[in-house]
Image (cartoon, rainbow, N blue to C red):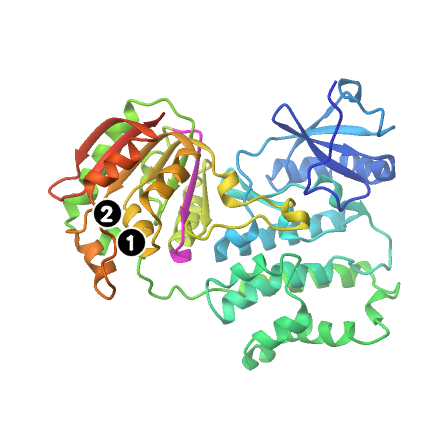
Amino acid sequence: MHSIVPLASSYRDNDGFVFKQDGKIYRIIKPSYFLHYDLLMNTGLYDSLTKAGRLISHSEIDKNSFDVSQIGDCKIIFPEQLPFISYPYEWSFNMWKDAAIVTLKIAMEALDKGLFLKDATPYNIQFFNGRPVFIDTLSFEKYELGKPWIAYRQFCESFLAPLLMMHYRHRDMGKVFTTFSNGIPLDVLKSLLPFRSRFSIQVYLHIYMQSNVSSKKEDTGSQNNFSKEKFLLLLKGLSSLVHSLSVKKSKSVWVDYYEETILSAQYLEAKKTLVQKFTNELNFEKLLDLGANDGVFSLLLKDKVKQIVAIDFDVNCVNDLYNNIRKEKIKNITPLFASLNTPSPAVGWNNEERTSLTTRLKGDLVMALALVHHLAIGANVPLDYLAKWLKEMGTYLIIEFVPKSDEKVKILLQNREDIFGDYDLGSFKDIFASYYDFIKEERVGDTERILFLMKRK
């Protein structure tokens, strides 16, 4: 038997930890949590939450199947496996909002069953089957009458703060969570929010007043006089505030790209036809759609594949795709907000707690449609770097080469010197031939763009 080693992301909880064996994720539960775990399972809370799709389901495993000699008495559970792990700084506004809402719904339902959430961090949420789901089974504890919600400040700094920044400042401000990965401190948040935010009673109460109280030597919120009614009122107030928040969809370069593109309408239909033709010849289960825009090609292939990760650096597009997924109840597409030339880094303790986006991007088929020129010319990424980077992601590649004669490339070059002497079709083919075997190449409609199907050497 293999020895059990906790994952680098699972060092914070004294009551248990997550480990990986044979590519599967398991969770150890220590005796200190047995009472709370039994309450979760026996009060009906687990059944209710899993039936509603709010909590990840699990099965209990015979601990004798593992070497637990160094751990001692414990329980082992096998949670439903997630196909992809995302982090909050890769979410769009509505993803953040839905994650916050489901966390508060869980907290209210737990309170009704005699438990409470001891953690309220967005890292306990993943997007699974098109919706946010809570993944930390050990976050539930027995409720003690009079005790305040210990995760209140964490919720405000980790959920409410990024949402308020996106609501009041800019739709991209969820990215600040990369720096403040444990939450935006309230004193920092106060300095970033506009003065008008003080006129919201809820914002003033949960941000400004809480910050003022917590800065005093004696925190009145820690006294054991916090009734269950006050607890529920607090949760409902937070829920009301989160529901009221919105973000303006300001005009960006890539919104409505395919509707307003300089290229002809026939271009999009021709590319759809080619993508369908190329993918019909492949057997694949996982698709990475890089530069997905609003997901037009992810949606095109959703019935052919088990799992799709659709990435774009325009958060408006990502939010539109997420709204579409939610509305149509699409279960196999995970939208992500990320810049591919500056992907999410490895962060947390020893840079191992949360892995980089590049490390997580693994699939059977990679699509890079209308992307190469943005990376090669817009971001100065050499074609050789690009080919090596893509090769590590998947077996097959569908990639579109956009020549300098294309109107989109001309826009990229109009205000800068053309230093890209090796950006041409011949160089592109020579470089990618070092890493891939070419299966197909066809011109896209009446344009000079070329679509390639390749297989990694």
Q: Quadrant of residue 181?
A: bottom right
Where in the figure is residue 15, as x and y percent of width and height?
A: 81, 41
Residue 284 or 22: which is nearer the viewer? Answer: 22
Q: Residues within 10 Å of mark 1 (few under 14, many from 20)?
A: some
Confirm or deny contact between disc 2 and disc 1 (CB under 8 A): yes
Q: Quick one: quadrant of the N terminus?
A: top right
Residue 261 seen anywhere in this rendered image of the structure: no
Q: Amino acid at mark 2?
A: Tyr
Residue 356 or 176: which is nearer the viewer? Answer: 356
- The residue indicated by pointer 1 is 377
Q: Residues within 10 Å of mark 2 (few under 14, many from 20)?
A: some
- How many labels were placed on the picture? 2
Say whether residue 316 is left or right of residue 400. right
Q: Which mark is on residue 113? A: none
Where in the figure is residue 65, as x and y percent of width and height?
A: 75, 18
Which residue is located at x 86 percent, y 53 percent? 144
Which residue is located at x 83 percent, y 71 percent? 219
Residue 238 or 419: which is nearer the viewer? Answer: 419
Q: Which mark is on residue 423? A: 2
Q: Quadrant of residue 256?
A: bottom left
Q: Amino acid at mark 1?
A: Ile
The first of marks 2 and 1 along the sequence is 1
Say whether residue 30 is left or right of residue 314. right
- Look at the image and give the residue range highlighted in magenta: 305-316
Secondary structure type for disc 2: loop
How far is the residue under mark 2 from the one under mark 1? 8 Å
Say whether residue 31 is left or right of residue 243. right
Task: Identify whether 147 is placed above or below 32.
Answer: below
